[in-house]
Image: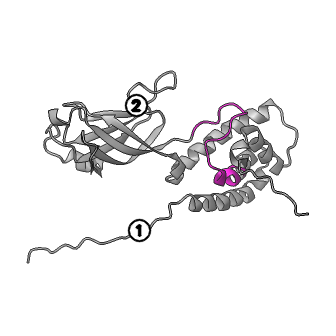
Amino acid sequence: MANTTSGTTTFGKTFVIDDIIAESYDRLGIFTLNGGHLKTARRSLNILFQEWGNRGLHYWEVANNTITLVDGTAVYTMWRSTADGTSDATAVYGVSDILEASYRNASSVDTPLTKIGRSTYQGLSNKTSKGTPSQYFVQRFIDRVTITLYLTPGAAEDGNFINYYYQKRIQDVGVFTNSTDVPYRFVPCMSSGLSFYLSQKYQPPRTQELKLLYEDELARALKEDGSDTSAFITPKTYYPNV
């Protein structure tokens, strides 16, 4: 008689914060935990998630949204952090950056917008000119993310939309019974990463060893998180006047 399988593939989401912390301490040879162990591990895991935000784009944190244009308004707040930690009514909480955007008219026809940098925006001569937006400039502050449109929407654009894809921040750990806001592919590097962070407090002689293990597993997870599509790079050709 053949052995049966579990029939489930839910391990990544049923592996709660308590389990991750216990696994990470197990790797350090610490098997009896108290409240202080749990508190410092949760803090380190939150720091680890923020460090992942510096590692580039995470595809599971890409989302889509729209903003409604207003005649004469060029700057829109995509996310604002208020005193109680929530967002205001017109913004999406946790926006990290705007990846791409399109102008969408009343017939739901999209026209791509070009993302420009601060210097390019600063070089525009008349920033109050009205018309259909063709470019956008993103500013990332401590407490908010804003998008500035050029041209400034006019009366013809009032009530139409900017449809955009944005990168979200990884959610905080929260209570110990929570699942993490990461896919199953990142469970191995999350556990090894937390062990690496905790080793700096409890097992300094093993820190370099655990860092190598963490970086190796994180590299594999980031590679697997990519998008399998074809990319074609075509250089621009310039013909100067002679």
Where does residue 207 sit, x and y in percent of width and height? 73, 54
Distance from label 1 to label 2 (Cα)?
A: 33 Å
Residue 173 within the segment the image draws in magenta: yes
Q: Which amino acid does label 1 sit on?
A: Ala
Where does residue 220 sit, x and y in percent of width and height? 63, 62
Q: Is residue 236 left or right of residue 197?
A: left
Furthest residue in direction right, as rendered: 1
Element type at marker 1? loop
Q: What stretch is highlighted in magenta?
A: 171-191
Residue holding disc 2: 91
Furthest residue in direction bottom, as rendered: 242
Residue holding disc 1: 231
Q: Nearer the viewer, residue 163 or 81?
A: 163
Where does residue 223 sit, x and y in percent of width and height? 57, 62
Our reading of the magenta stretch's main secondary structure is: loop
Residue 102 within the segment the image draws in magenta: no
Question: Which residue sits at x=31%, y=33%?
Answer: 76
Question: Which residue sits at x=36%, y=44%?
Answer: 164
